[in-house]
Image: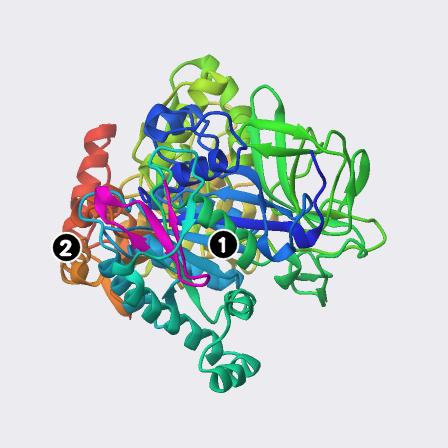
Amino acid sequence: MKSYLTKDIRNVGIVGHGGTGKTQLVSSLLYTAGMTPKWGKVSEGNTTTDWDEEEIARKISIQTGLAFAEWPCTLCGPGPDNKVKINFLDLPGYSTFITESKASLIAADCALITVDAHVGAQVTTEKVWDYCCEYDIPRAFVLTWMDRELADFERAMESLTSVFGRTVVALQLPIGSERGFRGVIDLVSMKAHFYTPDGDGKPKVEEIPDALIDEAKEAHEKIVEMVAEGDDEMMEEFFREGTIPICDLIPGVRKAIVAEKIIPVLMVSSLHNVGTASLLTFIADCFPHPDEHAQVGFTDKQGKGERVERKYDDGQPLSLFVFKTLADPFAGRINYFKVKSGVLKNDATLVDYNRGSAEKFQHLQVAQGKVFTEVIELHAGDIGAVAKLKECATGETLGDKNSPIFYEPAHLPEPSITFAIEPKTRADEDKIGVSIHKILEEDPALHFSRDPQTKEFLLAGTGQQHIEVVVAKLHKRYHVDLTLKPPKVAYRETIRGKADVEGKHKKQSGGHGQYGVCRIKMEPAERGAGIEFIDDVFGGAIPKNWIPSVERGVREAAARGFLAGFPVVDFRVSLYDGKYHDVDSSDMAFRIAGSLAFKEAMKLARPALLEPIMHVEVYAPDHYSGDLMGDISARRGRIAGSEARAHNVIIKAQVPFAEMLTYANDLISKTQGRATYTMEFSHYDYVPKEVEDKIVAAHKAAHGEQLVEEEV
């Protein structure tokens, strides 16, 4: 495998709404470039970048797929050395897995945003556009499925310009429509590219047909004006000549794209291999190489230290950033990385700056889907893979021990849905920890924890499908079988009033008896305060060595709950008096007395249930806003506001967690899958009385306990 210099590398993220044909597009581009002997099809399950069992079965991308192609660059001049290396990052588009796209897009220097030529801009189109803006990378739109019924170039262009503005400009016009789509007109070179459907993807370059020449000239002039508008030299030439010669226009278009002053639109039919060679030429000629994409690191791994500018340059100290980890059951952990500076050579030993440990990079590789090819070295800006590093994980920086730098990892939203998981057998329970840890290594959007209150194992992700995929992977890779259940809501109990009570424990049964009396005052504390215990005993009414016993008894009783078995929190207890016996008093007696005092106080202090309230943000097309706000209100939610963004709306609300357990699936059905949401914990608040009564009754029925009723 040839080693490519920084100026000859293009790192392209393929992003877009689910179902717009990203994986099929990459497969067709690889076939056209001669990188794969067979033309892979998603329908046949043999594409290069969707090779995981779950991806093939579901026919969707679940994780980042890497591939590369070699293609001539016309601006590099003639000859055998004019090829560039194009690294493709095929990223998921369905909302459930969109965090994977954000995590891996950080390694790209430019992006192709795929858009269904029939549908136009969709919710995820805007979301990945925002990711590109966040990473400040140039981008272009690709209209896919140009050969399908109802595909409409004009309508798609209108959709894109209305959402993303006037900088969206077509660099191509279609030749034919729907099933008659046969090629594209290159509006920069003013040539027609005719393709043979289902062919090798190489076009015949001819003059533009007479029927399309007027439309092409008008579109060409629009490009000339847009390019001249952002460049003083081009503007002078435009006013002097009345146009810009094609020999100057191609570099001018490239310059405008790199500066993000124009957002080009191209088109393909991936299923029939029409337009793919033209798209490859555009990527090679017009997209930037890594050194044209600025990068900043920090001297502190928290991102709070001094900013350090580090160029993608072979002469700079070596540094690289790990953006993706794959847990392969056979090869072990595989780390995908981008060389940020310097030249990485095979068998190099680098320092993991985040951990302070040394890692040896043996057998450097580049990925073509699941097939890896060894390389001798990788230059600044290139993307590679290495297996069996000792500790290194996603989001970490490695490099020369004398020039430490930290690159900031992607900031991912918190998981929006949580399931309780239960091993089916004892053997599954023994293997669950190790297996899930391996899955967590490759999926930063997944969280695994154990609820200290409910004692359940919790698996949190971006959607139900996400969790189901993880469970399927655990079964197929590690033979661990789990049952998914809705998580128990972590209710808590508290008090609204005050109480002044006595707890007395007296027992005589031969020999030493048990005797302890404590008097306490209980009152509410501010939310989040937990339990505050105050020792106000004077005059030795209770010896100092037994006061902690009273506190322990109160805390143990609070942990067992009063109304419905949930921990009691946010209250203050003052121990102010008591009695003891020289012989019969003991640690146990005062623990029991403290517990009894707590229970008596709860009867008088107006106990109440608290429930977790979540901060929820729903991102949806604006015409759904009324229905979604009504649904949130029906879930006892409080709308905090809404924000319009183009044709979409962001609804912000505070909603009880108990009402959000089924929200993910309900949102999909209400919006045909066009809406997404995020959810994170906000605070605890009182449960309404009618809901509280149902929860208490359900707890009694489940446990068969005669709990003390609340006194108002």
Does dot 1 land on a helix, a strand or a loop?
Answer: helix
Does dot 2 land on a helix, a strand or a loop?
Answer: helix
Quadrant where the N terminus lies? top right
- Magenta region: 174-195
Q: Nearer the viewer, residue 281 or 95?
A: 281
Q: Which residue is mark 2?
A: 634
Check the image and report above or below for 656 versus 484: below
Check the image and report above or below for 348 versus 578: above
Q: Which residue is mark 1?
A: 282
Residue 673 percent across, percent down from the top left: 24, 46
* Residue type of the residue flagged with mark 2: Ala
Residue 95 percent across, percent down from the top left: 34, 46
Residue at x 34% of width, y 31% of height: 59
To which quarter of the image does residue 298 belong?
bottom right
Residue 507: numbered disc: none
Tell whether 175 sits left or right of 14: left
Residue 73 percent across, percent down from the top left: 59, 51
One can see residue 167 in this view:
no
Distance from disc 2 to disc 1, alpha carbons, whole Å, reads 51 Å
Q: Is residue 181 in the magenta section?
A: yes
To which quarter of the image does residue 303 belong?
bottom right
* Residue type of the residue flagged with mark 1: Phe
To which quarter of the image does residue 225 belong?
bottom left
